[in-house]
């Protein structure tokens, strides 16, 4: 019995030209990657077994690899989230038609732009040194250590609040000294919620491809300035994940 197939979509680009991209190994078979069109919008797609795909490491990496390959030849890449499979090419055409008002606005906004990410994580030794230099916190720690567990309960809550405010002040310093200069070189930028207790900045930056070298140079300058205090994790280029909000749900006509 032949397994039913569907159409998996990876991303959208602005083109009226039919394209065939590098084939991929998917579910143990080589599969063609092609475009499905509506006006000047196209979806990058592949025919795959019709089922729900789990976001395993290999599956996510394949999804990202296809998008990265597309970015090498297209300057308007709108990423689509992992795992979207449709019954037929005709269904994808209907999807593009429904998304077209959003896509037609997005294409000029992201044309020739890429996203890069910068995570700044405080080094343990530097963070401990900063805490030890904070007189109020050190006094409070000393106060708690001299009390019984129950008696020090509210004092410990106060330490937690002081530590939170103190860490927020470090995040503000990093945002001003690292994020703000990078913001000036970006078409758009976001400081996302930090992940983990030592992260001081979780930045995403939308930059013109022509400014990538200038932006990299600035990141390197800031790294040299802060390298004794923090670690930089600089990633990209990516499509504009943090700056696009495509809703894939197609509303039923009323």
Image (cartoon, rainbow, N blue to C red):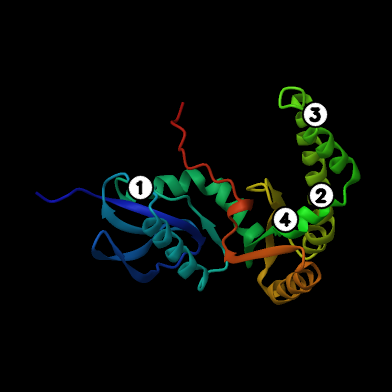
Query: Between disc 4 and disc 2, whose residue precedes?
Result: 2
Q: Residue at x 88, y 47 (%)?
A: 134
Task: Tell me the crowding category of disc 1: few under 14, some 14 to 19, or many 20 or more residues within 10 angstroms, Cα based.
Answer: few
Q: Which residue is mark 2?
A: 131
Q: Which residue is mark 4?
A: 189
Relative to the observer, which residue lies in front, 211 or 149? Answer: 149
User: Mark 4 against mark 2, which lies toward the viewer?
Assistant: 2
Query: Between disc 3 and disc 1, whose residue precedes?
Result: 1
Q: Secondary structure at mark 4?
A: strand
Q: Position of residue 241 (x, y in %)?
A: 58, 54
The tally of labels here is: 4
| Horizontal relation, residue 236 to residue 168: left or right | left
Q: Secondary structure at mark 1?
A: loop
| Real-space Cα separation, disc 4 to disc 2, in angstroms | 30 Å
The reply to whether residue 122 is in sight is: no
Query: Between disc 2 and disc 1, whose residue precedes?
Result: 1
Splitting the image into 4 quarters, where does residue 159 fall? top right
| Real-space Cα separation, disc 2 to disc 1, in angstroms | 43 Å
| Horizontal relation, residue 80 to residue 56: left or right | right
Task: Tell me the crowding category of disc 2: few under 14, some 14 to 19, or many 20 or more residues within 10 angstroms, Cα based.
Answer: some
Query: Between disc 3 and disc 2, whose residue precedes?
Result: 2
| Real-space Cα separation, disc 3 to disc 2, in angstroms | 17 Å
The reply to whether residue 90 is in sight is: yes
Q: Which residue is mark 3?
A: 155
In the rendered view, would you say 207 is above or below 52? below
Relative to the observer, which residue lies in front, 122 or 86? Answer: 122
Q: Position of residue 116 (x, y in %)?
A: 64, 63
User: Mark 1 against mark 4, which lies toward the viewer?
Assistant: 1
Task: Tell me the crowding category of disc 3: few under 14, some 14 to 19, or many 20 or more residues within 10 angstroms, Cα based.
Answer: some
In the rendered view, would you say 149 is above or below 99? above
| Real-space Cα separation, disc 3 to disc 4, in angstroms | 39 Å
Q: Which residue is mark 1?
A: 54
């Amino acid at each position: 019995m032949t397994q039913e197939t569907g159409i998996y979509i990876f991303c959208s680009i602005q083109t009226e030209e039919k394209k065939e991209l590098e084939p991929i190994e998917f579910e143990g078979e080589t599969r063609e990657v092609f475009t499905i069109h509506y006006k000047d919008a196209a979806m990058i797609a592949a025919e795959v077994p019709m089922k729900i795909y789990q976001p395993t490491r290999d599956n996510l990496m394949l999804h990202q690899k296809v998008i990265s390959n597309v970015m090498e030849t297209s300057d308007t890449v709108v990423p689509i989230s992992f795992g979207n499979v449709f019954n037929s090419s005709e269904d994808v055409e209907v999807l593009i038609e429904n998304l077209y008002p959003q896509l037609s606005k997005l294409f000029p906004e992201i044309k020739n732009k890429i996203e890069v990410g910068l995570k700044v994580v405080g080094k343990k030794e530097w963070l401990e040194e900063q805490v030890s230099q904070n007189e109020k916190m050190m006094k409070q720690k000393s106060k708690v250590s001299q009390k019984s567990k129950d008696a020090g309960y509210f004092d410990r809550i106060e330490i937690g609040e002081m530590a939170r405010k103190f860490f927020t002040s470090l995040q503000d310093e990093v945002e001003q000294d690292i994020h703000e200069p990078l913001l000036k070189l970006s078409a758009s930028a976001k400081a996302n919620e930090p992940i983990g207790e030592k992260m001081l900045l979780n930045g995403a930056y939308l930059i013109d491809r022509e400014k990538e070298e200038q932006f990299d140079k600035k990141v390197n300058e800031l790294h040299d300035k802060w390298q004794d205090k923090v670690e930089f994790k600089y990633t990209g280029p990516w499509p504009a994940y943090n700056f696009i909000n495509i809703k894939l749900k197609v509303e039923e006509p009323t």
